[in-house]
Amino acid sequence: MNRHHQKQFLCYTIIGLNSFATTIYFTYVYFLLHDKFGFRDKANLAVAALLGLVYAFSAWQGGKFGQRYGNIFSVKLGFTLMGTAFALGPLLGTAAGQIVVAMVVSASVCLTWPMLEALVTEGEAPAQVPQAVGLYNVTWAATNALALFVGGALIEKLGYASLFWLPLGFMVVQLALMFYLQKIHRPAAQTDSTPAPEWHRAPPAGAKNFQQLAWLANPFAYIAINTLVAVLPGLATKFHLTPMFAGFACSLWGFMRLAAFVLFWRWDGWHYRFRWLLSAYVLIIGSFAVILITPNLAAVLLAQLFFGTAIGLIYYSSLFYAMDASEAKSEHGGIHEATVGIGNCIGPAVGTAALRFAAESPNAGAWAVSGLLLVGLGALVWLRKARD
């Protein structure tokens, strides 16, 4: 195995571990707040909105930080800061302390994802960038879905302390792998100054418009995702599910997103075709509303099939169009992640406001966020028609 293949193998291993660790934490911290501190949907949505705001700003700055100081240094710093926060988590016995820990983790993780996105495409011929992006998406989505599925069981069997020491162990391993990656990456970096081959594939006409469309659609997709994650404890209560069975039942969309990533990685017929992006967005609106509003668990499971598939295409579009034939990959990756944070903030914020001003309606948050998604649909169509 040559240095380039070693580097790629290490990158994808780190990506998988990082996804598993952070997914468990950011999904089940809401169960911690619910079970230990009595947080209900409105309070959890407010926390989710705060973390989304932190994530959006940090991702935007994190991409610039990595571009300036180097991808590897940035990722190492991010793992160190997250590990420190996870180590302190079990020692803090107040809700405010746990929210501060979550804010630190949310900010620190932004020093990792944009740079990991850049590292897997670094040194690749432009024609190979779609393959690298595809494998990146499949890797993190696989461990993300696994974490959603088993996270509740781990919390039940090992206790809420495992919400901290398990990710802490992952951070230690990842940090060690990053030091090794740095060791083998330095010689390879010497080739980075070699002029790029002139036969590279240029993006098609209208590529800039598709980048804008995907960057608009992606935060709206994450409006739905982060709202759903924040109210999982409420859904579990609604259907009388323990955290373990909530993880089993509500992780189906994650596996469908993984399947979608595999499909859209191996088949490029969706590239630069607006109807695919539009169809996915419409599916998100309908399936999101069903998941949160229906009183039937079977309908929730069925809706997740469509939700996960649609989320997969929109996320894939945002990252692909951000990285395709782009030079400042860390910064563009940071912009992509910042759009994720914007959605993570706005959706729960709207849900919180709706539950506050329409407290008599338990589905007020779901309806309000669904309405917000419809606004995004109108904006998407307008932006497409307004293209140059």
Image (cartoon, helix red, strand yellow):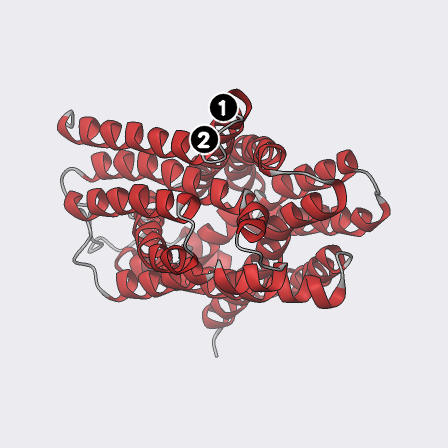
| Residue 8 x %, y % | 47, 66
Tell which residue pokes out farthest to the bottom in this image: 1
CA separation in Å, label 2 and label 1: 6 Å
Secondary structure, mark 1, is loop
Q: Are marks 2 and 1 in contact (CB under 8 Å)?
A: yes
- In this orientation, does residue 132 appear? no
Secondary structure, mark 2, is helix
- In this orientation, does residue 215 appear? yes
Nearer-the-camera pick, 61 or 196: 61
Residue with the mark numbered 2:
364
| Residue 231 x %, y % | 54, 43
| Residue 230 x %, y % | 55, 43
Task: Tell me the residue at 43%/57% (across/down).
Answer: 297
Residue with the mark numbered 1:
358
Give left or right: position of 385 versus 153. Answer: left
Nearer-the-camera pick, 118 or 16: 16
